[in-house]
Image (tube, grey):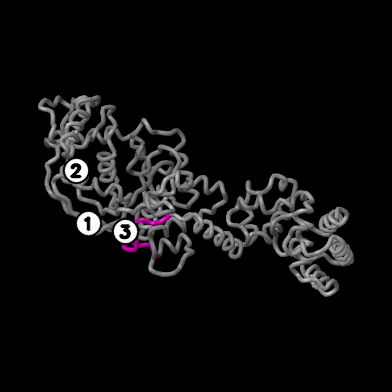
Amino acid sequence: MKIVTRFAPSPTGYIHIGNVRSAIYPYLLARQQKGKFILRIEDTDRARYVDGATELIEDTLKWLGLDWDEGPIVGGPNAPYFQSERMEIYHRWARKLIESGRAYADPTPPEQVEEYRKKCSESKIPFLYRNFRPEYTPEWKPGIPLRFKAEPKPYEWHDEVMGDMHTGPEVLDDIILIKKDGYPTYNFAHIVDDAEMGVTHVMRGVEYLSSTPNYLALYEALNLPRPKFVSLPHILAPQGNKKLGKRDGAKSATEYRDDGVLPEAMLNYLACLGWNDGTEQEIYTKDELIERFSLNHIQNSGARYDETKLLWLNGQWLRRVFDEQGANALYTRTNGFWPETAGNYDDNYKVKVLSIIYDRLKTLSDLRSMTGYFFSEPNIDLDLLINNKFIKKLSESEIESLLKQSIAKLSSLKSWNADSLQAALNELLSETGKKPAELFSLIRIAISFAPFSPALHLTMEVLGRDVTLSRLNAVARSI
């Protein structure tokens, strides 16, 4: 059997990271088994449709490297891949159910349905529409809702994550197949589309598990084979007490990208949020995920969202890109993340800055706050200088003297490189008798006025002789 999976999002707004994970698992399974991965846009809920949302979905998948074999842009033998363009297909399948006596047009007004629901509530019994089927059912045509005619009975099925499942006849109901506006419901459309497209594994959130008996009844009524069901557990809020939502601090995948999270890190994090290959490994490339992915290692309980872990992973990936591919490879990803004043400097200089700061970054957006002093003169803040925990023990005269000694030593250097600068700093320690934390903190703050910076000799090398000495002199004059 050739594996066929799909990701079928609704274009109703930004793409949540929970939605993204629902794309990653079917992608990994399809690629591992040399199968097919389909992108389908379920856009039949016109009231919630958002312009541009489809492009956002496509852009996010491309950013993560989740290429699809069939779907929008690439096409395929099962086009169209927008449900709103497949109306004729749904109506054709609907008529099969009508002809077999398993669907009926329902002219009951919504107000009456609500009365039925209220009556059941007052009687403290479950509301099942099959108990209120209309006596008169006209010939169906668009403009009248079409309902499935349930034949209640128990069902059993196997879920690849949740195991063997079963339910009684009490959960089966006359669900709506085609709405009044002529568009199909999700309950009907996804079954038709999966059958037409040959989907073998239906992977979706665990919230659909309770609806599975109604889906099984539809497969049976349409004489369709069941696909394999893979229910993905929820991604939970950081507190672990509920399903993750936007109010819990989780941003869209696009927001994380705009904040400087690498696609490798996002893919790595989300793939491991509810899946583990049984090892202690935490850093996975896409190829490693494809190789090791398996359905039986998807956990059946919710996975707690931890942004701190995501940012840690991103820092690991920033270093990995630099170490394995080089400074220029990482630099190509930094466009738009530098301080505004960095635009006055050439690429070579920015690569040098990146080369000494990269291992401190959690996201690329940290470049804005961490590198400003490389591109513009920092404001002299004597309070920051004299209140430093290592410097506050020194008197003003000692600070002035140390600065002048440092300026003299550095001015005498014939070559300005990391090795000569480190040697000069070591000589200054011997000559002044000061501890590294005292002397180096003084010089570091004087040239950067930043809370922290890379190794001092590397910082001075990148800033250059003129800038370094100019800043030290400016501070010395201010004491």
The part of the chain drawn in magenta is 292-304
Residue 46: quarter of image:
top left
Given residues 391 and 155, the one toward you in this image is 391
Mark 1 is on which residue type?
His
Residue 297 falls within the magenta-colored stretch:
yes
Residue 253, visible in the rendered structure? yes
Residue 449: quarter of image:
bottom right
| Mark sitting earlier along the chain (2/3) | 2
The residue sitting at 56% across, 46% down in the picture is: 258
On residue 158, the disc is 1
Q: Which residue is mark 3?
A: 300
Q: Position of residue 66 (x, y in %)?
A: 44, 51
On residue 218, the disc is 2
Q: Cα distance, mark 2 to mark 3?
A: 26 Å
Given residues 337 and 182, the one toward you in this image is 337
Left or right placement of residue 11 versus residue 372 in this view: left
Q: Is residue 340 above or below residue 99?
A: below
